[in-house]
Amino acid sequence: MNRMIRLTVNGESREVEVPTYRTLLDCLRYDLGLTGSKEGCGVGVCGACTVLLDGKMVSSCIALAVFADGRDVTTVEGLAEDERLHPVQQAFMDFGGFQCGICTPGQVVAAKALLDETPHPGDAEIREWMLGNLCRCTGYYKILESVRAAAERSRA
Amino acid sequence: MAAHRVVGHTIGRVDGVDKVSGRARYSADITLPGLVWGKTLRSPLPHARIVRIDTSKAKACPGVLAVLTARDLPDVLVGRRMFDMPLLARDRVRFIGEKVAVVAAIDPDLAEEALAMIDVEYEDWPAVFDPVAAIEPGAPLVHTDPGAYEGAPAERPHPNVQSVLRFRLGDVEKGFAEADLVFEHTFRTQLAHHGYLEPHAGVVAMDADGRVQVWASNKMPFRLKELLSHALRLPQEKIRVNLTPIGGDFGGKGSLMDLPLAYHLARVTGRPVKMTMRYAEELQAGNPRHPGVITLATGVTRDGRIVARRVRALYNSGAYAAFKPAPSVNLGGASMGAGVYRIPNLSIESLCVYTNAIPCGHARSPGEPQMVFAEESHMDMVANELSLDPVEFRRKNLLRDGDVLPNGHHLEHVRAAETLDAALRASRWSEPKPGPWIGRGLAMGHRHIGVGFTNAQVRLETKGTVTLVIALPDTGTGAHLVLRQVVAEVLGLSIDEVDVELATTDAFATDSGVGGSRVTHTGGRAAYHAAEKLKELIRAEAAKLGVPEASLAAIAQAAAADGRKLEATHFYDAKSHAAVTSFTAQVAEVAVDPTTGQVTVRRFTTAHDAGTIINPIGHQGQIEGGLIQGLGYALMEELGTEDGRISTLSLGDFKLPTMQDIPPLTTVIVEDPVGPGPFNAKAIGESSISPVAPAIANAVADACGVRIVDLPITAEKVFGALRQKEQRS
Ligand code: FES
Ligand code: FES
């Protein structure tokens, strides 16, 4: 069964007809052409598909698209403002917070959500918050450093 | 050392804007007009005859464009070196997860629904899962005549043996006869997936000229073209591989995987076809790290000199040899049975064995984490038997300049002792431990610097910048940035004045791609020499111009006005390994919880004998990433199996380290700029992973007196061993 849904994605209102079983991730990637969010595990444990739904972090691979009807979605594509990278994105580049980059869209969205909620987190808070975003390349040290740096820069 | 302007400087991932902003298009992100989706049906049985397959219901499903079985495909076998794997199972399945049918549909969910409508009747056959049982007389045979496969090694002591790899030094029998004491231990290592977060993905399309266009998460585009040409029976010129970013490789992204099926679906439907594996399929049928059963026997003199060693490794290779790329169809890491020690009389024998299990492939330093775990645990166990300090026992036997490795190479610039000292110092090895149930463990390793062949082309643009054209994918290591730095250094430019243009397989004749810790060396040297050639061209052009201070832009424009391009290409081919290797020494400090057996790594020290470091952030990133993979391998990663069935089919069950699992880390670099890479660089990508598990195992033994000989070192195992020890005393 298909359903028409209306949602705001990165500030733009979109209307799309989706099968009711369509995940939000597949809807973003295939129906809306926003391939920034990635599918890793597909079962809600790796965080590669992390997006913000009404400002709250969710794994879009285990949320249904119809669930986002009438709501506000922010994906990695919506973090930069007029080509200016979000401080979190810039920090990941400066401090080697990514290697292959497949986990990175989820990491930067998660880190932004953290800093929105807790602008100056301690290491323990960062580790706790970022626990659900797996990275197989970096060993996490430089992700931790990147998030820390993004927080510090915004303090300056 | 000469000071460099760009090389060695802290440069972040300036090439990463697309990755942090979500614009980078990985293979799974490629879309084309009319694209349809391919999905595969996999065998639920480990060994069976296919009696019949009924695809009629699936074919009748609206939106399904094609359903193919082996009957619809040419009878070809694929592989990377030994060609023993059918595209789809033909009459017989050999492991749970083997592909038996493939569907193309207009929607991925629909394709998966159609799979459920395919009816397959099987006749169950006896299966074998354990590599030790598989080479007993009378074991079920996984293949009827493996010797007949293209690329099959000649030696086959049992029909279930894929390959035998041997290393020999001196005379082992004589060596053991001279030994005062001989110690023998057996170790087991687990089945483990690479854990890259990008499942295999690919798109295949036929273009207007009838050429096959391929986008794939594959790190060796030219080898992929050759292998596709073989599998599809098409001339190589008919195939073009387009490079995409790769979402992690760690050795796992070098095979054909679903691409031939995507081609056949594209051929039959006339549409571009995308195939992506679900992570469950990765865990069930990717090409994970081989589990091993490894026995080492070492003969020593009473004062702790090693005089002889015999090593036997049995690797469970699963149902096919197809995923192993080395000419030996085996795992080169077996040579690490010698460790970092001079062993005058040595015999190593490594067997890769067929079973009805998931076919294994190459994983970051193939065969080494298995062997180094066994070897470095064994070293501590022997030291213990001899009542020698594990450091002193190692020191007595360390490799020195001029020593010969198991592969016959003579070594120079051996920095084993220096690297060991650096790790001991930084870890405060000799200081008292902070409390009970805390232990320290040491392990060492070393690794060659990769070889291969790579092309690089550099071109001076009329705006005065330089473009580096390569057809080497970046698997995530930041290799493109390293190559840019090399070109910038040679030409006296800043990093922003060098761009990378990623070519397709049409651009060059060949290239060995990414793997085996080679890219900084081979890609780096190709870029270096190409840049040197361009520098010459620029000099000549400037002389012609007669303006001594002419800018690069002016020079390029003058040449362009003359109808000439200033560009140079270099093909660099390193055929044999350099006489230097990179040493690693690591120290783990762990705490064992006596009530649960839980092991916590309190801090970790890693020391590396490195060449000139071109990109410090990237270099450190390789150390950290490999090390945490080693930590996961040591403590948690294991694909559980039950009669050939993987029981951990999600990343929730197959556990990878998270940010909570990383210990405080100290890295020490012993810089020794003598590598064969550009500016005397060495390799780093595969150095930090292997000694982690034995360092932790040795630390656990030091903390609580129990020796874990099979990976991973879980709380259950440690707790069980503690209980046993209690009962014994
Ligand atoms: S893909 Fe959604 S959490 Fe892994
Ligand atoms: S950068 Fe590759 S998985 Fe995180």
Image: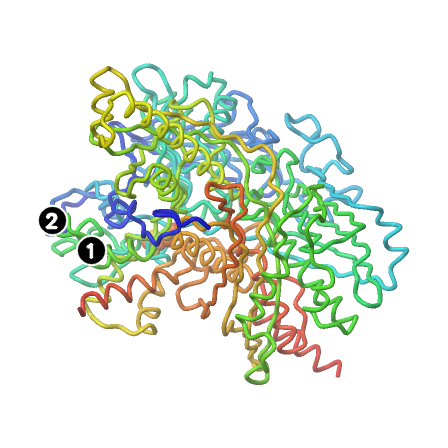
Foreground residue among B595 and B455: B455
Q: Position of residue B438 (x, y in %)?
A: 58, 79
Q: Which residue is mark 2?
A: A82
Foreground residue among A66 and B512: B512
Query: Where is B534 relative to A89, above or below?
Result: above
Q: Position of residue A61 (x, y in %)?
A: 30, 52
Picture quadrant of residue B75: top right
Q: Residue sitting at 23 percent across and 15 percent down?
A: B562
Q: Position of residue B504 (x, y in %)?
A: 36, 27
**Subunit bearing disc 2:** A
- As drawn, the label of residue A67 is 1
Ligand 1 lies in quarter? bottom left
Q: Position of residue A107 (x, y in %)?
A: 30, 57
Foreground residue among B464 and B195: B464
Query: Where is B8 relative to B388, above or below?
Result: above
Picture quadrant of residue B58: top left
